Image (spheres, helix red, strand yellow):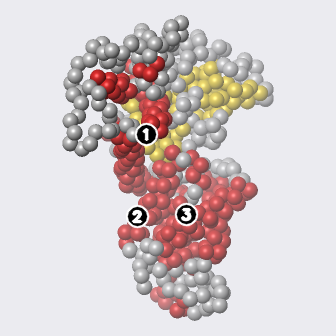
Amino acid sequence: MESFLNRYRSITILLLVILAQLALVAVQVKNDQDVRLIRVWTVTAVTPVARIVEALRGGSSGLIRNYVLLYDAHEDNRRLQAEVGRLKLDNIYLKNEIGMADRAKALSVFQSHTPSRTVAATVIGTGAGTNSKVVFVDRGSVSGVERGMAVVTPDGIVGKVITAYPTASAVLLITDPDFAAGVISQKGHVHGTLKGQGTPICKVDYVPFDEKVEPGEWLYTSGDDRIFPRGFPVGVVKAVRSAQPFKEILVDPSGMARGLEDVLILVEGVHQAIPDTPPVNQSVFIGSPPPADTTKPPDNPVKSPPGGPAGTEADKLRTQYKDIGDAQGHKFGEGTPGSKPPDFNLKLPGPVGAPAAGQAPAAAPPASKPAVPPGGASHP
Amino acid sequence: MSYSGGHILLSSQRESQVSRFPAWVMLVVPLAAILFQVYVPLFFEFLSFLQMPLLVVVYFALMRRSQVSGLLVGALVGLAQDSLSKNPLGMLGIVNTLVGYFAASVGLRLDVDHPLIRLLLTFFFFLFHQLFYWVMVRALLGQQLAFDLQKTLVLGLLNAVVGVSLFHFLDKLRKAT
């Protein structure tokens, strides 16, 4: 017997390992229970590394960005081309910042307005399975997250928590074929079951063929599933096909329309009424800068910052220093080491950014982009 | 290793030298592969076709030329993948165990340092992995998982090309004999 096992050692171990895993699968499928311990070990091993990688990515991109800005600030005095490059980088960075602020503000506004109690979370990874529509968020049972909780964004529902680990949670997205949620149409209050298909488009099942649902109509959560509270936007009906005994309805989900980075987990859901009107885009509006007065041509266009009349704080500061240098006859970038620098505390007449003494004033004051438009930031 | 007149079959036991790796390589490389599959597609979705854990299993199984070692690496990596997905634990574990075992068996007979052999083997094991997983999902879970042969062939080729480059990099982590 022993010699037999030695001879067939590899195949014996293979069979044992396969049988053990088959038993593992069988136990899980039969009892519909998870072997939580192994998952907890793996997630606990992987998510901290994912967090560190994410932190390094954010930190290094910030470091590189700051380095480029600093480098350009020195080069600024010698090469105008570098200034153009810096402004382009600035533009990209600010666009990203505005996008991020937009999302964060929308989330914050939504969080303060919704009657449900929520926990904000950030997506830190995707599921490793084949065709998996699962993401990991950085909030777990320590933050009060439990299995079965709904996950939403201001634009609509995103998914539900399928497993809550101490420091992270796995969220099944609404596009996953295993996902289902009760929905109700806005106009006819027709009930159905939303299901994922593994594609960006979901479908609604169990809507009888004689019920009226139109393309373009909004769907909301019905609250029937006891996961999503009633009244959260789900998406827009994209197509309706007549079939027996149930209609074929395709839905474009709205929750992930603007990407999936920050989400809210509903710790305590509160049912809401189905609104009569479609939900408006809940992004936070940031107004454009006021238009320049085109009736008067600028007397001194040279005083405008290089990026145009609407400059950043850095542009205003640069203009101020340049004015101070001009007032003292100093040319930046031409002084030898050890030479006397200009007095930057020199008070110039007029507001910051205004022309120095002896120069004609600019026709239009430097317009700056308001961070928040007058009358409130949000238009939910 | 010396090639026996350009032959791809190993001509003697002396040629089938076992590659050894430092312990940290055996730990860090599979972890990095799993982390890659979890983290990278979040920012570069087009890279989600890469089955890094599978490539790592195939590499270690081929190079270590030990069936037991190959199947254990496969089982552990597969279980870790299962843990990070919604699958029942063991689905990818079983598939990767078989991949590790068969890859190690092939590694005993073929010159797995040859890039062409590596390309073909990676392509074959990718197809085997996808097909066997599809069979398992249908048979054990009763789910109707789509299997697009044309897409799988293309993805297999892409994974094989990436795999050859990855194997070349991992070769540098081998212990000098």
Residue A79 is labelled as 1
Marks 2 & 1 on one chain: no
- Kindly report the distance in space between the C-alpha atoms of the residues bearing marks 2 and 1: 46 Å
Q: What amino acid is at disc 1? A: Arg
Question: SS of the residue at dot 3?
Answer: helix
The residue carrying pointer 1 sits among few (fewer than 14), some (14 to 19) or many (20 or more) residues within 10 Å by Cα, namely few
The residue carrying pointer 2 sits among few (fewer than 14), some (14 to 19) or many (20 or more) residues within 10 Å by Cα, namely few
Question: Looking at the picture, does residue A25 appear above or below residue B102?
Answer: above
Quarter of the C terminus of chain B within the rendering: bottom left
Q: Residue B106: x, y in percent? A: 60, 78
Question: Looking at the picture, does residue A69 appear above or below residue B66?
Answer: above
Are the two marked residues, 3 and 1, in contact with CB atoms closer than 8 angstroms? no
- Kindly report the distance in space between the C-alpha atoms of the residues bearing marks 2 and 3: 15 Å
Question: Looking at the picture, does residue A220 appear above or below residue A67?
Answer: above
Q: What amino acid is at disc 2? A: Val
Q: Residue at x 42, y 69 (%)?
A: B26
Residue B54 is labelled as 3
Q: What amino acid is at disc 3? A: Leu
Which residue does the numbered mark 2 point to in the structure image?
B28
Which marked residue is nearer to the observer: mark 2 or mark 3? 2
Which marked residue is nearer to the observer: mark 3 or mark 1? 1
Question: SS of the residue at dot 2?
Answer: helix
Q: Residue A49: x, y in percent? A: 37, 52
